[in-house]
Structure formats: structure tokens, C-alpha cells
Amino acid sequence: MKTSLLVISAAFLYFSFAKKTKEEGTYVKDITELNTAIHTASPGDEIIMANGNWNDIQIKFVGYGNEKQPIILRAETAGKVIISGQSDLKLGGEYLIVSGLYFTNGASPSDAVIDFAINKDTVANHSRVTNTVILDFNKAQRNQTDLWVLFNGRYNELDHCYIAGKSNRGPTVRIDLAGNKSIKNHHKIHDNYFGPRPPKGGPSAETIQLGNSYTSMAPSYTVVSNNFFDRCNGEVEIISSKTNFNEFRNNVFYKSEGSLVTRHGNYCLIDGNYFIGDTDSEQIGGVRLIGTGHWVTNNYFFNLKGKTFRSPLAVMNGIPKSPLNRYLQVTDVVVANNSWINCDSPWQFGVGTNVDQKEILPLSEIRSARPIRTIVANNLIYNDKGDQQPIVAHDSIDGIDFENNIINNQGVSFEKVSGLEAKGFTVSELEENVFIPASDISGTELYNGFEFDQIKTDIFGNFREDKNSVGAIVETPSEKPNLMDRSQYGPDWFTSEATNSVVNKTHSVGSVSQLTKAIQKAKSGDTIVLTSNRYKLKTPLKIEKDLTIRSEDKSKKAIIQYNGQEKTPAFEMNPKGELTLIDLILKGTGEQYAFASLKNNMSSLYNLSVVDSKISDFDYVLKAYKLSFSEYIKFKSTAITNCANGIELSEETDDRGEYNAENILINACQFKEVGKNVIDYYRGGYDESTVGGNLVVTNSSFTKCGAQEEDGVLLNTYGIINVELSGNKFLDNPVKFVARLWGAKNNTHSNNEIKNSGELIVEENLPLKLMY
Amino acid sequence: MKTSLLVISAAFLYFSFAKKTKEEGTYVKDITELNTAIHTASPGDEIIMANGNWNDIQIKFVGYGNEKQPIILRAETAGKVIISGQSDLKLGGEYLIVSGLYFTNGASPSDAVIDFAINKDTVANHSRVTNTVILDFNKAQRNQTDLWVLFNGRYNELDHCYIAGKSNRGPTVRIDLAGNKSIKNHHKIHDNYFGPRPPKGGPSAETIQLGNSYTSMAPSYTVVSNNFFDRCNGEVEIISSKTNFNEFRNNVFYKSEGSLVTRHGNYCLIDGNYFIGDTDSEQIGGVRLIGTGHWVTNNYFFNLKGKTFRSPLAVMNGIPKSPLNRYLQVTDVVVANNSWINCDSPWQFGVGTNVDQKEILPLSEIRSARPIRTIVANNLIYNDKGDQQPIVAHDSIDGIDFENNIINNQGVSFEKVSGLEAKGFTVSELEENVFIPASDISGTELYNGFEFDQIKTDIFGNFREDKNSVGAIVETPSEKPNLMDRSQYGPDWFTSEATNSVVNKTHSVGSVSQLTKAIQKAKSGDTIVLTSNRYKLKTPLKIEKDLTIRSEDKSKKAIIQYNGQEKTPAFEMNPKGELTLIDLILKGTGEQYAFASLKNNMSSLYNLSVVDSKISDFDYVLKAYKLSFSEYIKFKSTAITNCANGIELSEETDDRGEYNAENILINACQFKEVGKNVIDYYRGGYDESTVGGNLVVTNSSFTKCGAQEEDGVLLNTYGIINVELSGNKFLDNPVKFVARLWGAKNNTHSNNEIKNSGELIVEENLPLKLMY
């Protein structure tokens, strides 16, 4: 079905553009010519932007075409018109089409890269942006907010685009509904490839946001269909639906760390989507429901391991008489004819209940209103390995009507709920990630709920009238969905990095100057091998790509002696810098930093791994500045000795839910004589839907550390959601507390040996600053 | 237009019923026959209820007709089938019609008199109740809640009915939207006569309520059109719209003390309605707006004198991020092409702002969010007498866009607002209460806002495409609306009391037995004249109709000496009792009450007036029990002497906004030696939209009163919204306070003489119990 849609769509594009050749249109070479062409364009006109680099241009595409004769603005050759620098595109008028542009190496100077409005009064209607790429078009710092595509007006369309790499604050795509001109908008977002969006480390990093709480009463009717969401990991919500009557159909959510969430607004349809997880990740969610009247039908959930907020189906508790921007109670929701394959505890109800926090939160924050008038019927669960708890009831489920659901739990017993019956059936692999029932389940009785006759097809488009059954799939499709064929999504001219094959090189260097040059010259993914014993480094090494640096001989680790200026780092972590150090000895003279982010303009995240190495005599091991962000900080089998400060990730003190790193993993390391901030990891601001950061400290030792610690805590994890401390030794650390863990969240400790080092305590509830 | 609609509608009725005669249908004489007929009915069948009194029947009309062949349940003769006693009617199924019933002398034993549902699972769809009357079908006490017509399901209709007299708690008509079966309901309420509904003295007495705050996100699409609302005075909201996409078209609101309010929910249309006021009343309002996206067009407002919540156009302030059941901000509202004729300060914005109460109310109660993105355009204001303040800005009006509005203010200057221009034009009377522009205003420039082309006609149905102008009226209609011809509304067989002419009688009585008999025998509106000097009364006189009792010779006032049991009243005020005493001397022996309500079963209100009389030697002058209610308590030129208690109206202590009397008017009276509760008038519970009660004490004297007063306040007015104390004398009353007035509300005092009587103080803010 997807393939045929693509063909139709491609045919349409061909039809649209084939009528006009370059000769017929208005060919423009610079902004002046472009503006003139725009100002003089009539219905049916085509404006052709010359191939090449268009730097620092702000295009205001105002025109009035009509249904049969749109005004077209397109690249001479799709993908060869590069929009870079401080550039953006605004559309205003009627029936406009933009096609074939490539936004990269730049950022919008305004609130949006592409805006379907010139200003409040002049919006675009019936207009379309297609076959276009926006790649890494980030503002300099993550706190600088923008949107990459901002919808205003009505009946606009974003299709066959590739959009990836947004790191700064703000949803990638947003629908704006303030003002009657932008309600009942019937926008369409379809056949796009939403490439990876890295975690932002805090809120406001959705891939698509439809409205906001202030316009959550507006009828929107936006349709999001046939898109591929590839590792859209920005935050806990991949799609945040905040208006009414939106539809989400036939999308693929591939290993995306978040959920499709009906955050505000009501009466949305979630039909025929694929949610593909990863057995290694608990971050990948499915559908999270808040509000009234949503229908969740024909969806396929595979290999999802997320819990609570990120569970495969999370039906939340609401706040009684909720404030506009908080949690409406779930009522009148229908979840029917979906399939869950190899998902852990897929159905969770009353998610977010926090009645036990009545003492520390205001009443207007207490989610005590459990779902009511909700039907869960005709669904299918299959588990290769039986699940002891397919249903998790965080609150009473007396408001849920379970009808005619079946589960193959491999004979493993689970708490019985009337309406979910164990049944023996098998599944088989149709294609990668897609399993379909292999034994006939069409005989299973079906619940015929109110308007269930409106569930006309299955996920593949098979008509249920002909043959019906529980689950998302009634029979093998005539054509496979080819889910993982990424060429189905986005522009035909663009191939994402995920599908490029790159051969990585190794560079051997024997001196600091060779090292510096190699770092400059190397391609992302390359390895640099240190062949000498010692490198006397005087200025920071700038890391802005994916590099591994290691000693040639692991039994003779190379020494990098950094003698640079005080408060400068040996390795300066730039945006997109991903550094792995193996088998190295890194020394300072007590005044420098081993690693640090840039102080400003960290437009993308950086990552750092240190393995089998030694680090000593630095002021800081890692200094992460405010607004910097790392997805992974890993130290493994590494000794850290005689440093004034350790790993410092506590600069996000605005208490808006943001933090400096997503995952800190410390394994089998020895910290000795680190004066303070041994690990200092901070997140401030109460935001129940932020599910990071993550700190795992295992099998490591901390000896004589923390002597200069002012707050008396050796490992500071204030506000961090997931913390695991296990198998560590804490010896002779002159502190009051080894750690103060947050019991209400996922903070755990086990098998730690603590001698002469203060206490490791768990506090159930943390006083936090309310963000809302 | 109204007339022609009626003709069409009547034709349809004729068509529906003419095909079947009594012989063709199933004639039923009792509930058993009726039930059998219902159980066996097929599409197209007609069930005919025999004329007569059907007492204590609960009809469950379940059937499945179809569009062309509905199942009909009708009276043998419309109006001759009387449903009385403990009776109700429930409908369930498809395409049912009920016609010609007369509900009176009874009450529903359930939650509703007529319910478009049998139970949660079996609702009615495409069903209709027509040509039916519900009159005074009240439960025994006003705290016993019910609805008279409860809509469930979809596509149901209430038309050509007369419904009047509801006194108990609960809206007269309610649309229920809980559950997907009852959303998108497209119900129609049209051509009904909503007769007088007396004030209830507290909330929950709307004439029509569409949903509630919990279902306020639901799409409703109910249409309320061509109804006549005659003195629907139940509470501050005549119609309370609490869902989305409702339409209110071409209704007449005649001297109804309240407003059409978009209380919750959004995107409603208020078009072509008439709001007719009364120069004597400040209780009659127009349209009050809360929320988003409403359109108010083509409405006609006449002689409205209400203020703030009851102003002709009240655009409210919202609460930022409002809780579900409080006040959403006004956004994206359009008020266009309406006319205001002789209304005082018709446009009020930011109504309900209470930022000055931040100290005493929780933040979630502070209405500080002023209207934004709101257009007020192409409207017309005409004042016979210039208005110094046609626009009242309770908060900043920077969010309101005024465009092309005109006013004839007779040259009186007012604070200029761009977009409201003074213009000389005249109006002329088309018919009673309807004034239309007499000079040509079609040349006035019009604002062409977004979707203003959708305002296709004027209030009369004249096409604006042909000729357009500001205001609700572009030209004289081809046919007059005949607004006040009440025969247009409701059933054709029923004539409301308002149009009946009754000749009142006078009964002369010379003894107690004659008096007692005359009270029993008299018709409502009659007068009883006391011809003797003295009447020795031993048992209470029961007042259950409108009676005047007076002395024959005002210079020789008759004495009624009441010697009844202690704690019994001389005059027992029953439901619908309206007593006026003139020129009497009423005496007790110190242990009785002069007047009292029933202790229980006050199913309707009572009224009491005492003029030019003397009352002495009672335990209580007036004892109003809990759940009793009076619209008017008037004492004029009357001396009250030597009573233990005075006027006691303070039994409603549940603090839910209720109170015992709407208006207490004391003028030129002398209170002397009244021990306590001289006037004790109480309303508890914070409810900003309750605008009562009202106490006016003028030109009266209070001497040596309050000696036994425990709380030290002579005139207790706690929680009463409107209090006026002026021109009174307070002499030698041993109390701490004469009164403690509520400054934030409409409590005033002037020209009072206070000697040796404590203080008269004004407290700005009162600590009140929150109701929500």
C-alpha cells in the first residue's frame, strides 16, 4: 500500500512539473530576481531557482494561485539548490508549491525555517512544501528556540521531505492554531522521512507538535500519514497532539525514543501505525493517551520495552477539573483491533497517578482521575516469552471495559482480567519487524461496540467486512508493506546517512603536529593510532566529528601530557564531536581540563567515551558548560587520580527540566583523590514527563575523594530520574553522604561497600520547583 | 420567517398524523395496554393514548422505527391526555415520536420527566417530543434535583412544547454528552414556548443547559432556534452552553432575568436572536461570552439595563490556564452586525476581573486573562437618551479589535474608542419592542473580516449580498416578525396564563370562619375584605394562591389576634402562596409566628407583602424554613413591635450559593423592641455568577432592637450581593454593629442616622467558602 501511494504521489509530482520546462518558467539566479519573479507571478507560473548555494536569503513567497493553477517555486534540479547561512522561507497567499530545496549549513534568523505565514494577517492556504530537505539547520545553542516547519493557515501540506538533526529548543514541525484563520486547517503531513533527532535533555523537542494547550479547544483536522520516524529521540513525545480531530495514520515509528501522545485536545484517530522498538532500549514507547474520545485502531506494536509514560499503551490518569495545561481525564476512548508483539507489559492504565504525592504537590498537580468509559476490545497480544503482567493497573481499572481481547502468553500465568483471554495461536515473520498471525484466528468472537463498524480495514487495508478478526491484521496483504525500505519516504533525490555506506580509515600519528593534522583531516568514523610514547600538547585538540584515538600498543599506553593554559581542555568537544579514547594516559598540570564542551554555540550534542585509560592532574576531568549536551558520557576501566574536580554536569540551573547529559555510564573505574564534584549531575524543575537523565555507576571504586566537597555529597544526582549504583566501593571519602537518592523515581543501589565515607540514603520525595 | 416556519412545521405535523386515524392506530386505555402496544410496535405504527388522566405512570417507549416510518405515541386529543402523579417518560431506540401529552399535577419519580434514554446502553436517536406541555411538574422541594427534558443519543428533537414553572434544582432542559453515543448529537430544540421559571435563589436553574464542564470538549452541534423564552428567571444563565459547535438562532428572550452564556465549550453561533428587556429591571441580560471562537451576529438587544455579568454584551475575563470548570479566556471571538437599542452600557469587556482579590482567593480563581484576538465590527448602537459609557472596560481592551461600529448617542460624549464612531441616524418602531433604522445607513463602510462573507442574511433573513449595512437589520422585512404573538410558539392547543384574561373577585368576611372559607374558595388574584374590627384566629390560615387581604376601612384597621399554638404561624405560606396584607393589625401572644413557610415540601416559591399595617407580639415576624424560597418579601409603612425575632431568612447554611429570598424590600417601616434577627438574611458559598439576593431598607427606623442579638449585628446581610441601606434611623439599639456590608459587591449605605447603636461598617472582602 505504501509503495502504491508513493507511485501515485510521484506521478502527481511528475504531472505537476512535467508541463513546465526550465524554459517555460522564470529562471532566477539571485534574491533580487527571485523577489521580482515572486512579485510578478500569476496563477500557473513557475519560478525556478538556479542550482547553487543561496546563502543568507530570506524568501517571502507571497502569491495567489488557484486550485488548477498553483504558483510554483522550485529548484532547477531538486537538491542542487542549497539554502545556507541565515536563511528562511515564508509563504503567504493561496495555492503555492515549493519543491526541491536543500536547507543545510545554516539556521533560521527568525522563529522558523519554513513558515506558512508571512505575518499574522497574511497566512498561506492550500500551499505545499515538497521534496525538500532540512538537515542540521540548528541555531547556535539549544536554548535558542525555533521551528523548522511552522504551519499556519489552512489546507497546507508538507510531503516527501527529509528533516533531521534538530538539536535546539522547539518542535521540529509545529501546527499553529491561534486565530480563526488557522483552525479547521486540514493540513497534511505525509510521506516524509523524519530522520534522527538527538535527545535534547529536557522538554520542547517534539518532532511534530499540533497546537498548544492554549489552543487545545480548536478543531484542527490535521492528518499525519505515511511518514517514517527514524530515531526521533528529542524528548518523551515524538508527536504531541494538542488539538482536536487530528488523524495519525500509517506512520512508522522506528526505534524512536518517545511516544505518540494525545497531550491536549480530544477526538483523535490513531490508526494503522507501526511502532517498532528495540530489545535493548526502555526509552522507546508507543501511544500515550490523555483526554477524551480518541480511537486507537489497527496499530502494530513490536518489541517495545518502555515502561509507564513510555509503555506501549499508556492510558494516563488525569487531574480532576484539570487546568488547561495539565492532564485531562481519559474518557470515552476506544482501543480496538491493535496488535502487540513481544512487548513488555504493553497495557498500562492509570499511568502517572501520583496520589501518594498529595503531601508535597499542590492539589492541582495530583493525577487522581482514572480513565472512565474506555473500551479496550478485539486486541491481540503475542509474546514469544510469557509476560507475567501484560496489564499494569497503576490505579483501579474499573472504568475500562475489556472485551474480546486475546493473548498468547506461552502458558505463563498472569493476573486475569475479564475480557483478556489466553489463546493458543502462532505468528510468523512477514518481513523485518512485521509478524502476522500464522494460525487462523478469524473464528474468535468479536465485540461489536458503538461505531465499531467504522473500523473498516486492517492495517494493510484488507477489508474487515470480508474477513474480520481481533488484532491489527486479518490476513496477509497482497503486497508487503516493505516497512524498512526507507526509499519510500522523503525526497527521491536524498539518501539519509543511515543508508549510506562509509569506509572508515585509520591514521597513524607520531607527533602532536601529526595528531592535530590527522584530527583535522580525518573523516567521521575514522581512527587515529598513537605510535609514540609521549605527546606534549600545548593547545586544545578540537573534536567536531566521530573519532577514535588509541595507542598502538595497549600494553604501552601513549601519554598525552597537556601543558596548555589554565581552564583550557586537552580535548575541546565541539558540536557533533564524538570522541572515543582507548588505552591512553592523559595528564595535566593541575590547572587544565581533560575534556570540556564549548562555552557557547553548542549547536549539537557531543559524546565521549574513555576506555582502559588513566587521567590525572587536571582541574576538571570533564567540564560541561551550560547549554551543552551529551547523549553519552562513558568511562570504562579507567583510573582518575589527583584531580580538583571530576565529572561536572550541573550547569543547567534554570530549573526548567533541562540537564547536561542523557546517559552517564561509569563502569570498573577507579576514582582517587578527586577533590570535589566527583560526579555532579543535576536536573531542576518538576516535569513528570521528562524521563532522564540516566546515571549508572557500577563496579567502581572511590577512594579519598570529596575532601573539598562543599555540599557534603560525593555523587550528586539531584533531580536525575534513573540512577543505579551497584557493586562499588567507597573508601575513606570525607563526606557526609555518598549519595542521596530519589526514592519516588527510578533510583536504586545495591552491593556497595561503604567504609568511612558517610551515608548512602534514599529520600522518597524531593522538593522540586514546579515548572507549570 | 417565524410564521412561515410554523406553517411548514404544522404542515409536517398534519402530514405525520393525518395518514393515521384513531381507527388505524393502536388505541390504549391503561399502562398495561400501552406497554403491550409498545412491545409489539413496528415501524410506521401509531399508539394512541386514550384521553383522560394517566396517574402515576412510567412510560418506557422503546422502539425501532425508521426515517420514513417512525413509531408514534400520541394523545387521542392533543392536551386531553393528562400525565400526573409520579410519572415520567423515557424513550429508547430509533425514530420515535411523542405528541400531545400534558404533564401537570405531579413530578417525576426519576431524574427526568422526559428522558431520551432508557438507560446508559439504550438511548434514543432520531426521536422527537412535540406538541406537549410540562407545567409545574415540580418535585416537592427545591433541593430535589431533576431535569424536565433530558437529551441523550443523537438527532433528537423537542419542538412546539410549552414548558413552565420549574422551581426545583436542575436545568429545565439538559443535553447530556457523556459517552460517544451522545456526542455530535445535532439535537434540535425549536418553536417551543419556555414559560416563566421563577428565580430559584441559587445556581442550577438554567432553562437550557447543553452539557457540563466535564464534557465541555465534546462536539455537540445542538441547535436551539425559534423558541420564546418568557420570563425565564431561574438563575443568571437562561441558556448555559457548555459544549462545542452549538447554534442559537432566532430565539426571543423576553424579559428573562439572565443571559445566553457560552459557559464552557467553544465555537458557538449566536445569530438572529431578540433580547427584550425592561426599563424597570437590571436583572435582564443579553449574551455573556467565555471561551474561544464564538460568533455573535445579527442579534437585536432592546431595553436591556443589566450590568457586568448581566450586561447586554458581557465579554468575560478568563483564568490563565483555567481549570476545566472555571473560566477559559475569550479568544478568537467575533461580534458582528448586531444592534443595541436603548441599552445601558451595552458592551462590557473584561467582565469578572478580580485581580484585586488576589489576596483572598487562590490563584486558580483569579480572572486576569483579558479577551484577545476578538473582533467587534459592523455593529449599531442607538440610544434615545445618550449613554456616557457605551463601552465599559473592566480590564484593558487592547485585545479587542473594534471596526466600523456606529452609535447614535444623541450627541452625548463618551470615551472614544477607535472603531466606534458617532453617527446621526434615526430609528422607527416596526412593531412592539422592535425598532429598525429609519434613515438609510447602507452607505456606512463595512469591515470585511475573515469569513464575514458567511454572515449572509440579516435578522429578518434579508440577504446581505443584495444590500448590506451595519447592525442586525439591513431593511424592513417583507413580513413582520410578530415577535410578541405568543401563539407562534409551543403547542397549538395550549394557551399560557399570560394570555388568559381572568376577572378577579372581592370577598367580604366578617368572622374567622368566613375568612377561612373565603381563603379556601377564592381564586388566585382575588381580594378578601375584612369588615369586622377583630378576628380571633386559633389555627393558621393556609395561603396557597395569590390573595390580598385588607380592612374595609383603612382608618379603622381590622385586628387579627392570633392565639394559636406556639411556633405556628398566623399565615402559613404554601407553595405558590402570594399574600398581600393591607391596613391590618396583626397580633400574637409572644409565642407564635406572624408568617412562616412550610417546613417541608415548598415545591414552589411564595411571596409576601405587608402594607400600612402593624405587627406585634410574635416570636417571629417571618420564619422562612430551609429550602423555602420567596421572590419578594415587602414591608411598607408597617410598624413591627415587641417581637422576639424579626425577618429570619438564614436557613440555607449549606454554603452552596443558595438563599431564602430574592428581594427583601423594607420601606418606611418602624421596628421597635425586636429582640434579635431583626433582619437576618444569609447566602453562603462563593459563586461569582450568583447575583442575588437583594435587600433594600429605606426610610425606616430601628429603635431598641437587637438586645438579644448574639452575634452583635442588627441587620445581618452576610453574603448578600446587593444591599442598600439609606435614609434610616438607628436609635438606641444595643448592638456592636448596625451592619457589616460587603464592599467588593454592590453593598451601599447613605443618609442613615445612627445613635447609640454600634457601627455601620464596610468590609471590602468577605472570607467565603469556595464552591468549586
Image (cartoon, coloured by chain):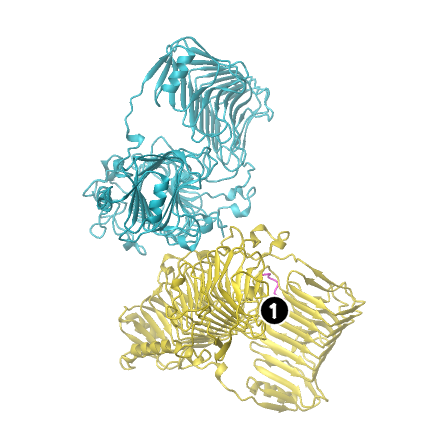
Chain colours: A cyan, B yellow
Is the C terminus of chain B in the top left, top right, bottom left or bottom right quadrant?
A: bottom right
Is the N terminus of chain B in the top left, top right, bottom left or bottom right quadrant?
A: bottom left
Direction from residue B602 to residue A52 in the image, left or right = left
Which one is nearer the viewer's eye here, A345 or A42? A42
Residue A312 visible in the displayed image: no
Does B652 appear in magenta? yes
Q: Main secondary structure of the magenta part?
A: loop
- When the figure is inspected, residue B398 is found, relative to residue A227, above or below; the finding is below
In the rendered image, residue A699, in percent from the top left (x then y), is placed at 45, 20
Residue at position x 34%, y 42% from top?
A34
Which one is nearer the viewer's eye here, B772 or B619? B772
Which one is nearer the viewer's eye here, A373 or B251? B251
In the rendered image, residue A456, in percent from the top left (x then y), is placed at 26, 52
Q: Looking at the rendering, which quadrant does residue B714 occupy?
A: bottom right
The residue at the far left in this view is A478
Residue with the mark numbered 1:
B660
Which one is nearer the viewer's eye here, A719 or A152? A152
Amino acid type, residue under disc 1 in the picture: Asn
Q: How many marks?
A: 1
- When the figure is inspected, residue A1 is found, relative to residue B425, above or below; the finding is above
Residue A56 visible in the displayed image: yes
- When the figure is inspected, residue A565 is found, relative to residue A768, above or below; the finding is above
In the rendered image, residue A471, in percent from the top left (x then y), is placed at 28, 45
Element type at mark 1: loop
In magenta, the rendered stretch is B651-656
Q: Looking at the rendering, which quadrant does residue A557 occupy?
A: top left
